[in-house]
Amino acid sequence: MKFAVVVFPGSNCDADAYNAAKNDALSEAVYLWHKDKTIPSDIDCVILPGGFSYGDYLRSGAIARFSPIMQEVINFANNGGSVVGICNGFQVLTESGLLPGTLMRNSSLNFVCKDVYINTINNSTRFTSGIPENGVLRIPIAHGEGNYFADEDTIKSLQDNNQIVFKYCDESGNIDDKSNPNGSLLNIAGIINKNGNVLGMMPHPERLSNNILGGNDGLYIFDSIKKYYDK
């Protein structure tokens, strides 16, 4: 399979995502520039990486949503292609309408950078099928606006359609307020769209995808995608 990593002005996790896909998941990978107007036909999964696209002016992801490549990403997703938005990429996905809800300032009003634990709520997706049964992963976060919010109807729809993929938890998998690093509703750390081909998550799997980094829990996500296309 083949990944494509979009690079926006201000992206700072593009090389990390590329390295995780190519060298850790042992897949083909290429970069796409934000001004590109086409996505090559052999791309299976597009990654919108973390960082501070366009300096996070207005709102995080608000300007990146209007980059030329994003209309192609929307078309790609609407045609069934896999899209993963990580941190700032998640924010871009909500701004572009590919995922519901929004990411607000952390409840502490502070930037939070640390390893957290996330519980896999739905391991039947193309992004999570390779995650072990206990479902608890240690993944780093680094954000100031990771507080997921949506109205009651949207939250109910996410629950009814099993679209909540990850929730913040403690090391044993307990989901509680103490393990919530940013105030997200229901401890939400990641969601998918109704069709199951677009994932947004605030934690950074590419930052812990090789044991040389101190762990490889993030690799489960890249390997799950690879498994989906290689089956």
Image (cartoon, rainbow, N blue to C red):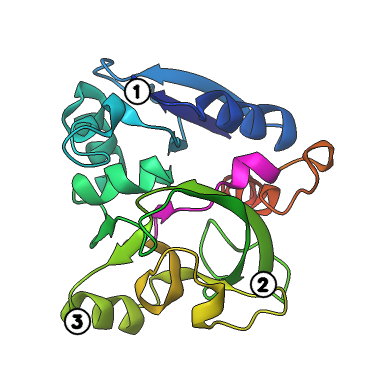
Left or right: 180, with 77 as reference point:
right
Location of residue 181 with respect to 78 vertically, above or below: below
Tell me which numbered mark, 1 or 3, is placed earlier along the sequence.
1
Q: Is residue 81 visible?
A: no
Q: Name the residue under label 1.
A: 8
Work out whether 149 lies above or below 213.
Answer: below
Q: Give the range drawn in magenta.
A: 195-208
In the rendered image, residue 63 lying in the magenta stretch gets the answer no
Q: Name the residue under label 2.
A: 135
State whether residue 18 appears in this view: yes
Question: Of the residues shown, which amino acid type is indicated by label 1?
Answer: Phe
Residue visible at 27% across and 78% down?
Answer: 155
Q: Could you classify mark 3 by the number of other residues whose Cα lies within 10 Å: few (under 14), some (14-19), or many (20 or more)? A: few
Residue at the image point whose x is 16% and y is 37% from the top: 58
Tell me where residue 16 appears, x and y as whole percent.
60, 29
Residue 209 in the image, given as x and y percentages of width and height: 71, 43
* Mark closest to the chain's N terminus, 3 or 2: 2
Residue 169 position (above or below residue 227): below
| Residue 23 percent coordinates (x, y) | 72, 28
User: In the image as oriented, which residue stretches furthest toward the right?
Assistant: 212
Q: Residue at x 21, y 32 (%)?
A: 57
Q: Mark 3 points at which residue?
A: 152
Which residue appears at 57% of the width and 24% of the height?
Answer: 29
Name the image quarter holding residue 65: top left
Question: Is 28 or 104 nearer to us in this picture?
Answer: 104
Q: Of residues 174 and 1, which is closer to you in this image?
A: 174
What kind of residue is marked 3? Glu
Q: How far apart are marks 1 and 3 (CA)?
A: 32 Å
Q: Which of 86 and 196 lies nearest the eye of the viewer?
A: 86
Q: Which of 92 and 178 is in front in this view?
A: 178
Q: Which of marks 3 and 2 is in front?
A: 3
